[in-house]
Image (cartoon, grey):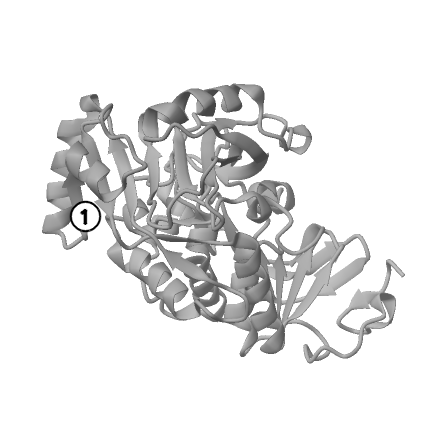
Amino acid sequence: MTNETLGETDEPFGLPESGCGDRPSVVVVGGGVIGCAAARELASDHRVLLLERDQIASGATARAAGEVTMQPSYTDYSEIADYATDFFRAYDGTGAFEYTETPSVELVTPDREDAARARVTRLRESGVEVAFMEPSAVESQWSWLDASPFAGAVRFTDTGHLDPYTLTTTLQSDAEARGARVETGLTATDILVDGEQIAGVETDRGTIRADNVVVATGWRANELLAPLLETPVRPYRTQCLVLRPESPIPDSFPMGWIPGEHVYFRREGNGDLLVGGWSAAEDDPAAASESADEAFRDHVAGLVPRVLRTDDAFRVVDGWAGIDGATPDTRPIIDAPADAPDGLVIATGFHGRGVMTAPVAGRLLRSLVADEESPFPTGPFSLSRFDSRSPDFEFLSISAGGN
């Protein structure tokens, strides 16, 4: 069975005809939100086969918080932020997917006030909808927030949140409806090259021939890309807790982040509070704990009473930790590198922003495979922007807002 070639016959997998023809033209490796977004974009006019070693949305996607803060994350590239935000607004209501628009606030400590005010002025002059709010204005608009320890807040409006699993499975369904084939429980072990051209992938169940391979395996990308290519991506571990107050947090509660505390927060649909962050580089990602650790719990326990204006007691109802890939400048690599074999396209190093960047990544991956012009700048995602490709760099922790 392992010597059979998927695409030449379906017999090893016991699958019906999928509409992919005799052989896929594109193999997408990775069934997280990025891989499913790429498959959806490509499937309308390419024979797409998506491979996932576990289940769809079972890796970093499953442990994402679902915040969409593209506007504060890409203030220097409004076209990129707008593309993602417009996608989520239009995609809302597709299948089970829902996008909830929610304003965001960056709580500013006194030592950061001057820089924050200057940044707001600069952003407003460039057309970004942003404002600096005094502490009294913050508390007047959001009664649950205690702004007294802060100099104020930077408010963004074009932000929101979603369920990462629902988004990913909806993208998967769309991809399959457009003709893509999805295989789970199948591990790609090697990328095959014929001269300077991609020839397909080797899997734990045989060889799959294809002219294009999209690697969207998150922090594991370097494992599969070696020895063809090295990327400056290193694994890091991030955490989340879900806290339940005695009375639900109001619907109007904003998303937010506190850069100096390395955390972000948002309201869950049932009125719980999600707090995430506390990220650190991870040298042994495969063995890392998937549970939130005691240090993070203690940090959140001390922080919540300082930020929320309530006498409610909070109890932890859920908690987890996950691994993602980081880059030196916190932005992902989405590229078909010039020194890589023709037909190899990579998407890695999303630094905790994979879910919100998925529409951009999917569209750019299509542009790279199909040799089409991108509707937004590609420079921020190019591998060539880095002088060094070594994964040994100082990890930079970011909160939800970013740049």
Q: Nearer the viewer, residue 58 or 109?
A: 109
Instruction: Write down the quadrant of residue 114 in the picture.
Output: top left
Q: Quadrant of the C terminus?
A: top left
Kindly state the secondary structure of the residue where label 1 is placed: strand
Q: Nearer the viewer, residue 264 or 323?
A: 264
Q: Nearer the viewer, residue 47 or 160?
A: 160
Horizontal relation, residue 358 to residue 82: left or right: right
The residue lying at 69 percent from left, 54 percent from top is: 55
Q: Position of residue 338 (x, y in %)?
A: 45, 54
Q: Position of residue 241 (x, y in %)?
A: 52, 34
Horizontal relation, residue 179 to residue 230: left or right: right
Q: Is 73 situated above or below 237?
A: below
Q: Nearer the viewer, residue 4 or 163?
A: 163
The residue lying at 56 percent from left, 27 percent from top is: 282
Residue 272 visible, this orientation = yes
Give the amino acid type for the residue marked by disc 1 in the picture.
Val
The residue lying at 90 percent from left, 61 percent from top is: 1
Instruction: Write down the quadrant of residue 143 in the picture.
Output: top left
Q: Position of residue 382 (x, y in %)?
A: 39, 50
Q: Is 282 situated above or below 141?
A: above
Question: What is the residue that sits farthest to the right in this orientation?
Answer: 1
Residue 343 visible, this orientation = no
For disc 1, the marked residue is: 130
Horizontal relation, residue 218 to residue 82: left or right: right
The residue lying at 20 percent from left, 21 percent from top is: 111
